[in-house]
Amino acid sequence: MVVDMAQTGVQQRGVIPDSELDTWLQSGIGGERELIVEARLPARKLSVRQSAGRKLLIQGRGSEKDRSDRLRELWALIAAAVATEPVLLNSAGAVAVRATPVEVRKFAGSPLIRAIRPNRRLARAR
């Protein structure tokens, strides 16, 4: 499913919270950027149990399968739109991708996407 950003208009304002990234995307000019595409996922189902004076956090299995399926669906959508293979970040519930503005427009309007953010690299410790 390819969703052209031009057709979705107003929805993009909430999906791309970074104003510089939004300007880059709207201009359509510029090279590739590294992005983190956060998936819109179902909430995790957790329960807390007390055992021998300790609290145990237990995750429901059904919710993790739903999250995993939705993440794989988002990865496939992005992979079809970009030239370089995206990286699935399972624990983060996101996909890392290197894309041009034209490529981002192909998937930015998908309801699977919660947010698109720049991939900020941390300075290395010396």
Image (spheres, rainbow, N blue to C red):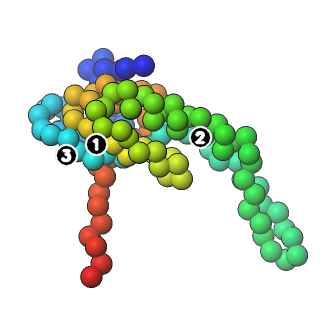
The residue that disc 1 covers is 98
- Residue 89: give x, y in percent of width and height: 47, 49
Spatial separation of the CA atoms under disc 3 and disc 2: 31 Å
- In the foreground, 25 or 106: 106
For disc 2, the marked residue is 68
Alpha carbon separation for disc pair 1 and 2: 22 Å
Q: Secondary structure at mark 1?
A: strand
Vertical arrangement, residue 126 with respect to residue 86, above or below: below
Amino acid at the residue labelled 2: Ser
Secondary structure of residue under mark 2: helix
Identity of the amino acid at label 1?
Arg
- Give the crowd class for mark 3: few <14, some 14-19, many >=20 residues within 10 Å: few
Q: Is residue 12 above or below residue 45?
A: above
User: Depth check: 81 or 70 in front?
Assistant: 81
What is the CA distance from the residue labelled 1 to the residue labelled 3?
Answer: 16 Å
Numbered disc in front, either 1 or 3? 1
Please tell me which of labels 3 and 2 falls first in the chain. 3
- Residue 79 in the image: state x and y as whole percent: 38, 32
Would you say the residues marked 1 and 3 are in contact, meaning their CB atoms lie under 8 Å apart?
no
Q: Specify the quadrant that holds the C terminus.
A: bottom left
Residue 122 x/y as whole percent: 30, 66
Q: Is residue 66 left or right of residue 113?
A: right
Query: Amino acid under label 3?
Result: Glu
Q: Which residue is mark 3?
A: 20
Quadrant in the picture for residue 121: bottom left
Q: Residues within 10 Å of mark 2 (few under 14, many from 20)?
A: some
Earlier-in-chain disc, 1 versus 3 = 3
- 49 above or below 36? below
Residue drawn at point x = 36 percent, y = 20 percent: 3
* Badge nearest the viewer, 3 or 2: 2
Q: In this rendered view, identify the residue nearer to me: 58 or 13.
A: 58
